[in-house]
Image: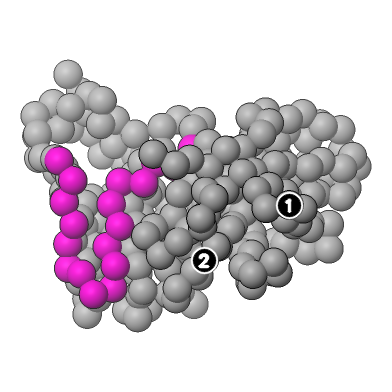
Amino acid sequence: EPEVTQTPSHQVTQMGQEVILRCVPISNHLYFYWYRQILGQKVEFLVSFYNNEISEKSEIFDDQFSVERPDGSNFTLKIRSTKLEDSAMYFCASNQNYGYTFGSGTRLTVV
Amino acid sequence: KQEVTQIPAALSVPEGENLVLNCSFTDSAIYNLQWFRQDPGKGLTSLLLIQSSQREQTSGRLNASLDKSSGRSTLYIAASQPGDSATYLCAGTYNQGGKLIFGQGTELSVKP
């Protein structure tokens, strides 16, 4: 069964550093997403991406966040200057009208 | 504001019991509703997708129903097993390709 692949599985970074989280969505999917889950809290939507541009973003997705699809397979989330409160599990997902498929997540710890 | 709520927050049952998990949503114009399973510290595994034109979906011991008029969905698990222990999340979307809005989940524990 097709999978969404995320790397790395764990990332520890110092406050103020830039991080890039990587995702390979399912190849024939057209919609891509990033979500995050702070420990013990709901899964929260960050941003959706369709046709090579952002289609929707949440209030969380401020100027320190950016997304990119640099080639035909990768989808990245960049956090420019990490804060302690960015510590969370970050999930990538893709969709093609048959339900969403999520990756296994990247656990980001900001110290 | 579009919100999804799940009740109960936690549930503990003995092995073999049938159980129902509840999900409610504030906006009945839901497009698709999807149920997920999440094991501790892990990703989200899709269980069932109910599209807006459908009323229910079944997979093995799982059955999910959707009643848009009442703003409710239920996930029925038959003959529960210890391996079913996990957090179950429901999430809805309101348009094609739109964001998923998640409930807070029901943490299920099935005791041997």
Decide if residue B17 is on the left or right side of residue A99.
left
Task: Give amino acid for label 2.
Answer: Lys
Quick one: SS at disc 1? Answer: loop
Q: Within 10 angstroms of label 1, few (less than 14), some, or many (20 or more) residues?
A: few
Residue A87 sits above or below residue B29 on the image = above
The residue to which callout 2 is attached is: B99
Q: Within 10 angstroms of label 2, few (less than 14), some, or many (20 or more) residues?
A: many
Residue B31 sits above or below residue A49 on the image = below
Are the two marked residues, 1 and 2, in contact with CB atoms closer than 8 angstroms?
Answer: no
User: Outermost residue toward the top?
Assistant: B112
Q: Which residue is rendered at x = 17% and y = 27% of the image? A: B81
The boundaries of the magenta stretch are: B43-60
Task: Give amino acid for label 1.
Answer: Asp
Residue B75 sits above or below residue A39 on the image = below
Q: Picture coordinates of residue A16 (x, y %)?
A: 91, 42
- Which is closer to the viewer, label 1 or label 2? 1
Considering the image in quadrants, where does the N terminus of chain A appear? top left
Decide if residue A83 is on the left or right side of residue A4.
right
| Label ID, residue B104 | none
The residue to which callout 1 is attached is: A71
Task: Classify residue B14 by image quadrant.
Answer: top left
User: Outermost residue toward the right?
Assistant: A16
Task: Classify residue A14 by image quadrant.
Answer: top right
Q: Picture coordinates of residue B9 (x, y %)?
A: 34, 47
Mark 1 belongs to chain: A
Which residue occupies the foreground of this view, A107 or A23? Answer: A23
Considering the image in quadrants, where does the C terminus of chain A appear? top right
Which residue occupies the foreground of this view, B1 or A1? Answer: A1
Which residue occupies the foreground of this view, A21 or B41? Answer: A21
